[in-house]
Image (spheres, rainbow, N blue to C red):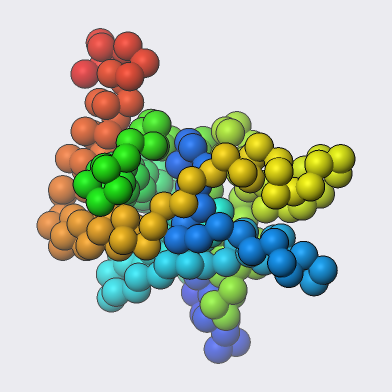
Amino acid sequence: MLSIIKERHSVPIGQFTAFYPSRPFWACSKLDFSSREREGWFHDQMAKEVFSCETDSYTIKICRDGRIMLRIVALEGGQEQDQPGRIEDIVRRWGEYLDYLNAFYLLLDSAMLEVANFVYFDLHEITNRDAFRVHYEDGKSVGENIAMESVVSVFQMGRNLSNYSHGVPIEYDSRIMMRPVVSMDVIQRASTMFASVVSSPGSEKDLASFAKGLSEYKIGNYETL
């Protein structure tokens, strides 16, 4: 459920809607295993924001572990935290967020092919089961919903070192060593294309529909095309 958080006691508070692509990757660079003696080193590196683009209308943040977070200003303002609005408005905003998320996912997939000449992401439609809300306070993530009905929850939990086998050095765990690096050039290209989408209202719905069509085609569900 979407809820709106505004400034309280002069502390900036906001929310993002986030997702993980179906295949894990490192954004910009791999983990640095040389600092493992420091407490919390693994979580801090996984959660590190390696890319951010903020405009008057939206903000994108991407973390090293592949988490993609989006905040659309027009979908976040206008209501108090204790008055989240009618259920119809909440459902509408959620649907609009999913359009933007699916549009960005499609653009990231396209940028990977264009810039890196490599097809990696198994593009699928992002639904309300896959997306989750991340709460920010004073510029820092302070909480999030867990997407328990999706494999996304595995990626969310994967930020914690305790969820890996203690019998194998973490750098040799298959969930770590099999991830490719998606370069800054790829991410920047996707971000640049997304800026054009946001500046052309309605185009996010077209791209989201196209992404859904590709997803349905891959699983052989031709009746919805």
- Whether 159 is drawn above or below 61: the answer is above
Which of 161/58 is in front? Answer: 161
Give the left or right position of residue 172, taking residue 217 as reference: right
Could you say which is closer to the camera, residue 162 or residue 148? 162
Task: Confirm whether residue 122 shows in the render.
Answer: yes
Q: Does the rendering let one see residue 81?
A: no
Left or right? Give the position of 12 relative to 155: left
Residue depicted at 57% across the width and 33% down the height: 150
Query: Residue 145: where, in percent of width, then height?
Result: 62, 50
Indicate the quadrant where residue 179 lies: top right
Rendering coords of residue 109 (x, y %):
31, 42
User: Within the image, what quadrant is residue 124 found in?
Assistant: top left
In the displayed structure, does residue 97 sit left or right of residue 84? left
Q: Residue furthest left?
A: 200
Q: Is residue 68 above or below residue 153?
A: below
Which residue lies at the image location 57% right of the left edge and 40% below the top edge? 178
* Percent coordinates x, y for residue 35 in the rendering: 73, 69
Please give the name of the residue rendered at 74% of the width and 48% of the height, measured from the top-left corner.
170
Residue 47 is situated, as x and y percent measured from the top left of the image, at 60, 62
- For image coordinates 48% across by 46% down, the residue present is 180
Q: How many marks?
A: 0
